[in-house]
């Protein structure tokens, strides 16, 4: 059995999330998704998510491609964390090279054979939706 791990904010649910989870799940037999806690989102993005952690967990758990949801995944994905949880692959997406560099820095300890980049869905993102809600395009 191949167990895949992914970490997301998943604020403002949209088709890009579903496509990401489907692609990640297709890499193996089981997909565990860590939903990032509100305070870590604030520290990373400079704002709290619009949806609180419990709402984001509920949405992610409702996706048919997700087998398990956790909220205690570390910011840095290490070999020790992956081994302790029995994960074989770490899946992530990136909108651009700057974001890709950050994603790779967050799993620098993992060998390339344990990392998989999922194609990004352009044209929609939670950040973009936040701007739309504020009337800014």
Image (cartoon, rainbow, N blue to C red):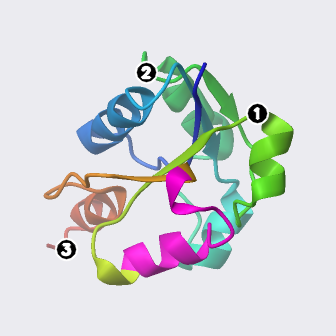
Picture quarter containing residue 120?
A: bottom left
Q: Which of marks 1 and 2 is in front?
A: 1
Picture quarter containing residue 79?
A: bottom right
Ranked by sequence position, the earlier of labels 1 and 2 is 2
For residue 86, say whether it is visible.
yes
Q: Mark 1 points at which residue?
A: 86
Q: Quadrant of the N terminus?
A: top right
x then y, percent, for residue 28 = 48, 26
Q: Mark 3 points at which residue?
A: 136
Q: In this view, does 38 lie to the left or right of 58?
A: right
Q: Is residue 45 left or right of residue 21?
A: right
Residue 102 on the magenta span: yes
Q: Is residue 14 left or right of residue 103?
A: left
Q: Name the residue under label 2.
A: 65
Within 10 Å of the Cα at label 1, are there few (<14), some (14-19), or many (20+) other Cα atoms? few
Residue 49 on the magenta span: no
Question: Which residue is rendered at x = 39% and y = 73% of the image?
Answer: 100
Q: Pointer 1 and pointer 2: residues touching (CB < 8 Å)?
A: no
Ranked by sequence position, the earlier of labels 2 and 3 is 2
Secondary structure type for disc 2 = loop
Q: Distance between the residues labelled 3 and 1?
A: 43 Å
Question: Which residue is rendered at x = 25% and y = 37% of the image?
Answer: 15
Q: Distance between the residues labelled 1 and 2?
A: 19 Å
Q: State which region is magenta.
A: 99-113
């Amino acid at each position: 059995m191949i167990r895949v791990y992914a970490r997301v904010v998943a604020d403002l649910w949209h088709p890009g999330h579903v496509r990401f989870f489907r692609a990640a799940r297709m890499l193996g037999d089981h997909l565990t998704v860590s939903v990032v806690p509100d305070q870590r989102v604030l520290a990373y993005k400079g704002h709290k998510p619009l949806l609180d952690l419990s709402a984001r967990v509920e949405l992610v758990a409702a996706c048919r491609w997700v087998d398990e949801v956790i909220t205690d995944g570390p910011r840095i994905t290490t070999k020790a964390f992956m081994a302790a949880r029995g994960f074989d692959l770490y899946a992530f997406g990136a909108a651009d090279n700057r974001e890709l560099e950050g994603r790779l820095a967050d799993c620098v300890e993992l060998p390339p054979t344990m990392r998989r980049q999922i194609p990004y869905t352009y044209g929609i993102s939670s950040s973009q939706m936040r701007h739309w809600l504020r009337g800014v395009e």
